[in-house]
Amino acid sequence: MLKLSYHSHLIECGTDEAGRGCLAGPVTAAAVMLPSKFSNNLLTDSKLLTEKKRELLKPIIEEAAIAYAFSHVFMEEIDKINILQASITAMHRSLDGMIDTLSRKRDQPQHILVDGNKFNPYPDISHTTIVKGDSKYLPIAAASILAKTERDLFMNQIHEEYPMYNWKQNKGYPTKEHREAIRKFGVTKYHRKSFRLLPEQYEIKFID
């Protein structure tokens, strides 16, 4: 069973991202602060759950959370600052959004639980990076669910604009089908130009 807190004496929140390894679409992060008595036996790393279960958990998390927020960092910024910094930027912006919804100083988080092993310090709040934290701590798992579902929603929307890439199914990840579509149809405004989209990168055509 996942743990609710890392430091029992501090007010904690969790943050995680989704879409870091994709060829198209944003990298999306979420931050979540859960109440001290929160529990849910289904909640775990979003990658271990079906889409149906993630969609089931999303409103449960949003209803139970003391505060939450998400943030997209889009393709142009990813290409400019690199995917690691874009992921951390998305987490910082989601923390900004979450904290902005908290009106009382005593509700502010005192510590951030971060999935992974890379993070830039957030102003005035300590943090702990935890490898595979989304399968160990509930606040990170909750953040992973919100990040994944919000990003999936965006990918489903842009699928309608460019259905030949089947983003509704592959969500922008480098599947064989996705790469074949890039080879056949070219690169859209939603693709990350700094990524190696195809082995024969020099042959890529741009359709925007």
Image (cartoon, rainbow, N blue to C red):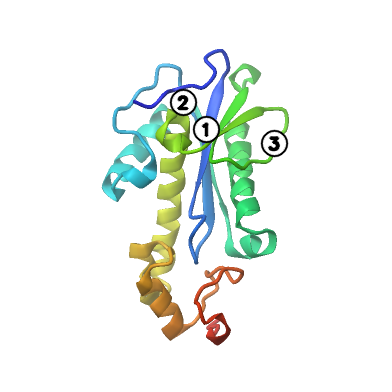
Question: Which residue is situated farthest in the top direction here?
Answer: 9
Task: Work out whether residue 36 or residue 6 is closer to the camera in this orientation and state it.
Answer: 6
The alpha-carbon separation of the residues under discs 1 and 2 comes to 9 Å
The residue type indicated by label 2 comes to: Leu
User: Looking at the image, which residue is at 61% across and 52% down?
Assistant: 84
Query: Quick check: 120 left or right of 184?
Result: right
Q: Residues within 10 Å of mark 2 (few under 14, many from 20)?
A: many
Q: Residues within 10 Å of mark 1 (few under 14, many from 20)?
A: many
Earlier sequence position, callout 2 versus callout 3: 2
The residue type indicated by label 3 comes to: Pro
Q: Percent position (x, y) of residue 46?
A: 38, 43
Quarter of the image with the C terminus is: bottom right
Query: Quick check: 92 left or right of 199?
Result: right
Earlier sequence position, callout 1 versus callout 2: 1
Residue occupied by mark 1: 14
Helix, strand or loop status at disc 2: loop
Is residue 64 visible in the rendered image? The answer is yes
Residue occupied by mark 3: 121
Q: Is residue 131 above or below residue 47?
A: above
Q: Percent position (x, y) of residue 29?
A: 53, 46
Q: Is residue 104 above or below residue 173?
A: above
The residue type indicated by label 1 comes to: Gly
The alpha-carbon separation of the residues under discs 2 and 3 comes to 21 Å
| Quarter residue 135 falls in | top left
In front: label 1 or label 2: 1
Earlier sequence position, callout 3 versus callout 1: 1
Q: Percent position (x, y) of residue 11?
A: 56, 19
User: Looking at the image, which residue is at 39% across and 79% down?
Assistant: 180
Labels 1 & 2 near each other (Cβ < 8 A): yes
Residue occupied by mark 2: 34
The alpha-carbon separation of the residues under discs 3 and 1 comes to 14 Å
User: Looking at the image, which residue is at 42% across and 34% down?
Assistant: 62
